[in-house]
Each structure stands twice: as C-alpha cells, then as structure tokens.
Image (spheres, rainbow, N blue to C red):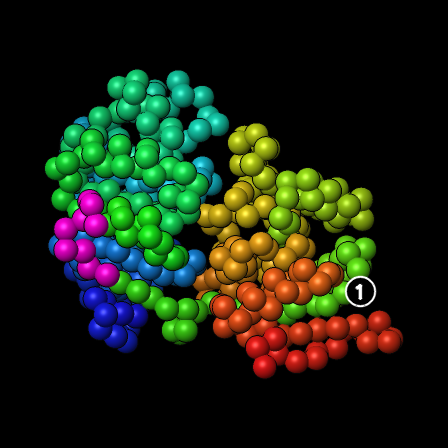
Amino acid sequence: MEIDGVVVQDTYFYKDMNLSEAIMKALDKKGFTQATAIQGGAIPYFMQGRDVVAKAPTGTGKTYAFGIPMVEHVDPQSDQVQGLILAPTRELAVQIRDELRDLCAFREGVRIVCLYGGQPIDKQITQLKNRPQIVVATPGRLMDHMKRRTVRLDGVQTVVLDEADRMLDMGFIQDVTRILDKIPHRKNLGLFSATISREVMDISWVYQRDPVEITVRPVEENRPDIQQYRIDLEGREQKLETLIALLEGGEYERAIAFCNTKNMTDRLAGLLSMRGISCKAIHGDIQQRVREKTLQQFKAGQLRVLVATDVAARGLDIDDVDVVFNYDVPDEQENYVHRVGRTGRAKRHGVAYTLVASVTEAVRMRDIARNTRMDIQLLKYDKDGCLMLVDSENS
C-alpha cells in the first residue's frame, strides 16, 4: 500500500485504532480482528476529518474503511443527516446500508436509510420522516428527494462516493456535482474507487482540500486468491456443455456466469434451467423487486448459478462464490477484473474460467492478459475430450 506515494507495509488491527466499544463489539460479532490494507490506511485519516482519495481492488473491504469512521462520528441524538454515501447502483447501495447496520448493532439510536430508484418514493419519504443520521443513495433518486424537499443535507459532515469511477462513467457526474454543491460545509469527502479516472480526479481537484491519497495495489498480499483459466473452444456451440461439465466436475455449489448482453443472460439462464441446474438471470431490465428476490435466493443457497450482466453484478456483496464463468469474453479489461473479483473474496480460494470460441474473443483475451498482467492458465480439449493445461497466457 502507498500513502501519498510512500510505501507502507504494516499489518493493522482494529484494537489499535482507538475505536469505540460499540464498534469493537460489532466487529467481534462479525469475527473480524485484522483490518485490510485499505481500512488500515483510510480509517485514521477519516477519523481526523481528512479528505481521502482511495484506490483499491474490488473485495478489499472499502465499505468498512469509510463506514467505521462515519458511524463513529454520528451523533445518535441528532435528527440531521450527518453522513451521505453515494453509490452507482441499487445493489451496491443496499449492500452498503446492510454493512453499516451491522456496524451499528451496538450503537443505539443510529438510523440509516437507503434511497434508490425502482422502489416507491412514498415508502422512502416515510423512512426519511424517521430522521436518519446516515443516508445511502444513488445520485438520481437522491436528486428526486432533494427536488421534493423530502431530505435536507445542510447538516452533512462526511460525504463518500463509493465506486466513484463507475458512478461518473454511468453519467451521474452532473447529479454528483449538484449534490456536492448543496453541502458546502462538509468536513470531509472520500472518493473510493477501483480505478482513478480523469473524472474522479476532476471531482477531487474541485471539491477536496489537500486529500490523502491511498493506493492498494493488487500485487499485495490482499490480492484475491483466484486461479484463472482460459479455455479455447472450436465454436460457440461448445460453451454450454463446457460450462456444465466444469460446474459438475468441480462440484461447485455457487457460481456466477457473466454474459455481455441482457438477451444472452436470459438465454443462458433458460438453457441451464432446462438442464436441471437451479439458475436465474439478473440484468437491468428485470424489475428491482425481482432482482432483490433473486439475490436473496442465491445468497440463501437456493440457486446454484446466477447469470448476470456487468452492470447488474457491479457491487454485489456475495463473499462465498466458488467459481466465476466468463461465458462471454468481456469487452473491457476493467469488466474482466471485476468479474473474476466476485470469487476469491474474504481470503477464500476462488476459480475463474473464461470461454474463448472465436478469433475476436481470443484477441480480446490476449489484450486483457497483457494489460492486467494476471496469470491466466490456458486449457484446451485433447483428442480424448479431456481438458489439458497448455501454458500460461502471459508466457
């Protein structure tokens, strides 16, 4: 990890961070004692009220890095919104809310509300009447509430943009800047992201003051333990049978399969269901309540496979996925990183397979391997129909 360009290689423990008894009891209840690198780097500065720009890979514990200081600073006796977290998707917003509620298990009086599109706004207005101290929201829905004057942000002390790069890439930059302009007296602003794009830096330059820059690189020991394979096939028609063979041969109980389009996501989910594999699809055209139900079923172990598009899967908080399948090679290398990052989380071993069935997919996969510098092992079927390890994709 680097803090303002200086390499730091310390091990961090929550007990050394001067956290409250309530937070320590909540962490103990979760079984957490050692902080991740991004938590060890960011929490002290957030506790001091400093602005932070944090770059860290998916699955490294960013939510607690800003969530712990935010909960610590909240005054449960106040009726004002004191902490605001903006997230690009409904799924990520709900995940953050749930993690913050876990942190507040022994912090009586702290109220958290989650605001996102796809849910009746009247229900959210009722929740806001309970005077929450922390609001987690997607930018568009928060703007709706601000226009209706159903939420006031003049008492906000801390603002966090989680997955800031994705949020700005999705076209929320105007909403984000309008929201920040309405909170001129905040104490600190945190930008958390897997990549630091030009748009993220623009926000930093305009809205932050002397921010601490924290970078956690994937090459550190907190890099997820993921064995990655590329499987070359002779045609697209082999993909379904290969996926099923891998799923059954590896005895994987929880899998996510990624497709590039909503249509392919629905089609693959249907094909797997026809083969007796419990499976459902999740993408942007599916109603929010149905998506939430599907995620709950997957988390509860009622579904063996979740088939998803990149947008729908961004921000999913699922820590125990055994395997990820790239049924389609992603169009962007960033999507590949986020896809395989769904497995190998919480220090578990993970496996990711990418199915390559055309020259175009092969070219994209070579570019991904070269640019990400990940060790991707190449598999091919031999004449007897058995998968054979050929070589490392980077060699």
The residue located at (49%, 57%) in the rendering is 334
Q: Residue furthest right?
A: 384
| Residue at numbered disc 1 | 234
Q: Position of residue 26 (x, y in %)?
A: 31, 52
Q: Nearer the viewer, residue 139 or 278?
A: 139
395 in relation to 12, above or below? below
Residue 306 appears at what percent x and percent y? 63, 48
Specify the quadrant that holds the C terminus. bottom right
Quarter of the rendering occupied by the N terminus: bottom left
Q: Give the residues in magenta.
A: 205-213
Q: Amino acid at mark 1?
A: Glu
* Quadrant hosting residue 42: bottom left
> Is residue 140 at least partly visible in the picture?
yes
Relative image position of residue 233 (x, y in whole percent): 76, 65
Looking at the image, residue 326 lies above or below residue 180: below
Residue positioned 37% across, 37% down in the render: 172
Residue at 26% in and 55% down? 53
